[in-house]
Amino acid sequence: MVVKQEDGRELRSFKFKDEDQSQEVRAVERRVLLETLASQLPPQTIRFSSKLKTIQSNANGDTLLELEDGSQLLANIVIGCDGIRSKVASWMGFSEPKYAGHCAFRGLGFYPNGQPFQRKVNYIYGRGLRAGYVPVSATKVYWFICFNSPSLGPKITDPAILKKQAKELVSTWPEDLQDLIDLTPDETISRTPLVDRWLWPGIAPPASKGRVVLVGDAWHPMTPNLGQGACCALEDSVVLANKLAGAINGGSESVEEAMESYGSERWSRAFPLTVRANLVGSLLQWDNPLVCSVRDKFVIPKLVRLGPMLEHTNFECEPLYGSKT
């Protein structure tokens, strides 16, 4: 990892294994991850273009799902993984995610003849503005720009406008970042507000309702400041799969009890991560000149230790139900 100032001067560099033998970073394009997971399913398992319109539960505990195309599905078990604007979460009584005070441009720079960067995570810190980029393949480099904004602002989808706005934010920053934005295919650039939902004990609804349960951003949306949103969703899925497999295959718990057990176990991990991600983001987005000067001259060069900073990434789970390993 390399941390720089907005003028390109290096503040600090780390090697993960030198700091903590348990740590590593693997940057994976989300499309590749999803395709890899989907390839392990039987053909026709996934039904695309199936937006959910309404949910109804009936007397025997089954759930009727009506899709926007008018078709209906009667489900014995529903796992809501429908993201931060989850219709399943709304039906279960969850509040809308709350805006964290900053937005992010994100994209994938594409180098058809091979990207020029070393295998490093690169961060650049300014005042109320930060950016980063990391190679995800031999030809693609993920990048982001995070900036303070008092309001969500208008929704913009025009790639030309998005690129123009992103470049204006970092017009005096290192040219590598400018080039990345220019080399970003239109379909990969986005501008989104950063939001989260704090699952306060005794206030937030439980993760399950009958035989309906939430996973990932649908349940615990968090800001990306710890890089744990998708990771936490994968952890959810492993734990839930084990719980449900045990219940369905004659274990001592019912499906409803398995879902409740999953919710209790995962809350103790997801809630602290959500809070920590929010606080880290607030610290990184400081725009006070004095505070930023102290950060650049003292905190990052002398105080930051990578091992403790990334301890939250350590997660151990039991092997999947029925696995021999």
Image: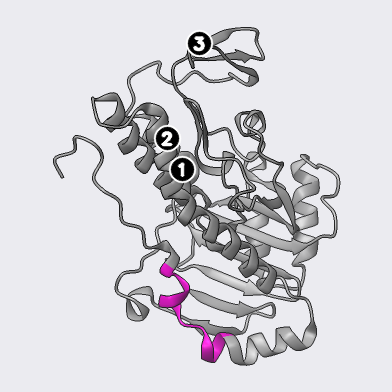
Residue 204 at x, y percent in the picture = 62, 45
- Where disc 3 sits, the SS reads strand
User: In the figure, is residue 322 to the left or right of 28?
Assistant: left
The residue that label 2 is drawn on is: 259
Residue 163 at x, y percent in the picture = 74, 51
CB under 8 Å between discs 3 and 2? no
The 10 Å Cα crowd at callout 3, few under 14, some 14 to 19, many 20 or more, is some
How far, Cα to Cα, is label 2 from label 1? 6 Å
Q: Which of 101 and 30 is in front in this view?
A: 101
Magenta stretch encompasses residue 306:
yes
Range of the magenta residues? 300-311
Look at 56% across and 77% down and name the residue there: 3
How far, Cα to Cα, is label 3 from label 2? 19 Å
Look at 44% across and 70% down and name the residue there: 310
Q: Which amino acid does label 1 sit on?
A: Gly
Residue 216 showing in the rendered view: yes
- Count of numbered tags: 3
Q: Is the magenta stretch mostly helix, strand or loop?
A: helix
